[in-house]
Amino acid sequence: MTDYHALDHWIDAHFEEEVAFLQALIRVPTDTPPGDNAPHAERTAELLQGFGYTAERHAVPAEEVQAMGMQSVTNLVVRRRFGEGPTVLLNAHGDVVPPGEGWTHDPYGGEVVDGRIYGRAAAVSKSDFASYTFALRALEAVARPARGSVELLFTYDEEFGGELGPGWLLRHGVIKPDLMIAAGFSYQVITAHNGCLQMEVTVHGKMAHAAIPDSGVDALQAAVAILNALYAQNALYRQVQSRVAGIRHPYLNVGRIEGGTNTNVVPGRVSFKLDRRMIPEENPAEVEARLRQVIEEAAAALPGVRVDVRRLLLARAMQPLPGNRPLVAALQKHGEAVFGEPIPALGTPLYTDVRLFCEAGIPGVIYGAGPRTVLESHAKRADERLELQDLRRATQVIARSLADLLA
């Protein structure tokens, strides 16, 4: 029988080392864009070597990386085989959005203040590079399983959809796990998530001097009409409710808009990028067709306007597979024991690259270091942070769960 308290004690005894590992990871930027992430993979591999782990480096060909709008991607795989039995894969991603404004701590400093560690990716998801690595180290030092395997997978393109990370590795047969756990953003067990459709809409008018505006066609004014039509759809989405606990309704966000040449020129071209979150019950093809229809109908009412619509990303929703029950049961059991409260299993309105494993028939869940909700972590906001106590507890829960899954 596994001595769970011995696992906990090993993690406690090595926790300062775990925090130092996370600090070292935070201090190598992985802003995506631009997505020059191979240097972080090299640094991570060096640190893992210090623990006696040899990381396989799987560099994605430059032409594939550049086609996705990134600069470099090297995925890391660490394999630890104990005997015959299931392979459990632990996947965290190192790429992050740029820090943006408003920070009161160095986004690449890894500062520890009042029991919290600050930095971009401190919570999502370099923290789970640390929780997964040290859970595996504790497992080998204390539980010493005699069956199965554990694999660490560290990837670098989740912000761009995961096709060069898990997607690329699955397509090339580099990984073939039986079960998988992916980086979390809270200590809830996530079994489902939204899908995401991202599109770029380019509105073409006719540039003209602002002194004679009637000689042109204002692309910005046309874009406003199209945006109003899209936002009207957003109001209707609230009437569509998901049956998955933790997920409410679809929604649409326009996150970027650009165009025009100068203040005294009627803009001849305006483009914007939209993000449409899809609940698990929605059909992605129907969602995209409806959005294109709304855009085309709005544009048709505007003389002299032409619109191009380009899909940027289609990430399908994560649907729970029946085989995930051992994962859910182990994480809930040990989460309750370590955190002292029931741990729910539910969906999240976010989207992740875990869907790629589920589409390949590999049961998976999302769980890792984090607070109860992603909002508390400041993920993708200024002063992203993680309570060190949550990092410690997540590491203990993962180590305990691995011991059960490989018992």
Image (cartoon, rainbow, N blue to C red):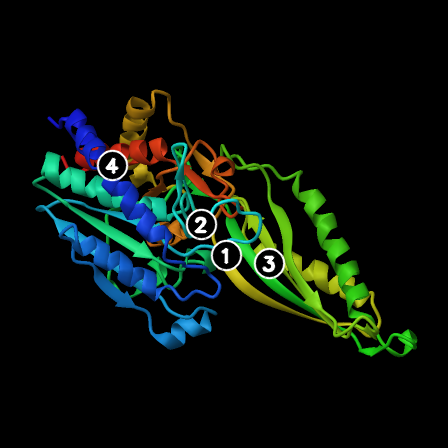
Q: Which residue is mark 2?
A: 120
Who is closer to the viewer here, 127 or 199? 127
Q: Secondary structure at mark 3?
A: helix
In space, the residues marked 2 and 4 are separated at their CA atoms by 21 Å
The residue positioned 33% from the left and 45% from the top of the image is 128
N-terminal of the pair, mark 2 or mark 3, is: 2
In the rendering, at what x and y percent does residue 293 appear? 69, 61
Q: Is residue 96 left or right of 8 when viewed as pictured? A: right
Q: Secondary structure at mark 1?
A: loop
In the rendering, at what x and y percent does residue 395 appear? 27, 36
Residue 67 - label: none
The residue positioned 22% from the left and 59% from the top of the image is 46
The residue positioned 44% from the left and 68% from the top of the image is 70
Q: Is residue 298 left or right of 9 when viewed as pictured? A: right
Q: Is residue 175 left or right of 109 when viewed as pictured? A: left
In space, the residues marked 2 and 1 are separated at their CA atoms by 8 Å
Q: Which residue is mark 1?
A: 98
N-terminal of the pair, mark 3 or mark 4, is: 4
Who is closer to the viewer here, 293 or 67? 67
- Disc 2 + disc 1, Cβ < 8 Å: yes
- Disc 2 + disc 4, Cβ < 8 Å: no
N-terminal of the pair, mark 1 or mark 3, is: 1
Q: Secondary structure at mark 4?
A: helix
Residue 288 - label: 3
Q: Which residue is mark 4?
A: 15
Which residue type carries mark 3? Glu
